[in-house]
Amino acid sequence: MTASLSPHPTSDLQDLDATFLPIGPMRQVSRVTRLDGPHIEGEVSLGPAHWVFPLHFPHDPIFPGTMIIEAAGQLIALWAWAAGQRGRPRLVRTGAEFHHPAGPELRHLVLRGEVRRKRHLHFATVEVYGAGVHVATVEGVLAVLAGR
């Protein structure tokens, strides 16, 4: 079952603070650029000033694979939000293949996801690109649990 989305799809996601994404440095998705049926695209802002690069690793900076997986999970959660899901999003299964490192020379990562929904579960494949290079493929299942 594919959730129906609004006729002006990204308008529901212009204010990411109004969604159930994490805040502060844990928020990876900077903006949603496309939302159309099962497809969603977003960006992660990077660049040399990103807080992670001096820490991971100081002399060989690279954006961690775990944060790429987190960004993919957040993109899936945003698709679920736009589809009307409310509650507590949880990644329940992930797998990733990393094809190219993402360093500070990249200004942003582009995430392109395709999501299908079955009840409260959201199954997705998210392709991640940086400067036109395929960085990673993330497979994820996100559950939206009932709110408190």
Image (cartoon, grey):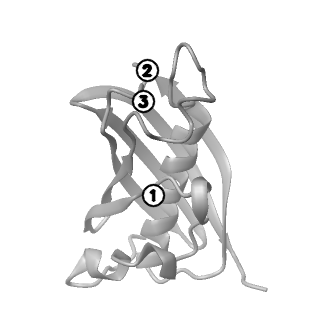
Q: What residue is at 42 percent from the left and 30 percent from the top?
A: 136
Looking at the rendering, which quadrant does residue 65 occupy? Answer: top right
Left or right: 16, with 114 as reference point: right
Q: Secondary structure at mark 1?
A: helix
Q: Give the number of the disc on residue 75.
A: 1
Image position of 12 with respect to 115: above or below:
below
Q: Secondary structure at mark 3?
A: strand
Q: What residue is at 36 percent from the left and 39 percent from the top?
A: 127
Q: How many C-alpha atoms fall within 10 Å of the one at disc 1: few (<14), some, or many (≥20)?
A: many
Looking at the rendering, which quadrant does residue 33 occupy? Answer: bottom left
Q: Nearer the viewer, mark 1 or mark 2?
A: 2
Rendering coords of residue 28 (x, y %): 50, 52
Q: What residue is at 47 percent from the left and 23 percent from the top?
A: 98
Residue at the top extreme, as displayed: 59
Image position of 147 with respect to 108: above or below:
below
Q: How many C-alpha atoms fall within 10 Å of the one at disc 2: few (<14), some, or many (≥20)?
A: some
Looking at the rendering, which quadrant does residue 145 occupy? Answer: bottom right
Q: Give the number of the disc on residue 101.
A: 2
Q: Give the number of the disc on residue 147.
A: none
Which residue is nearer to you in this view: 146 or 3?
146
The amino acid pointed to by label 1 is Leu
Which label's residue is closer to the chain start, 1 or 2?
1
Image quarter in which the N terminus is found: bottom left
The amino acid pointed to by label 2 is Pro
The residue tagged 3 is: 136
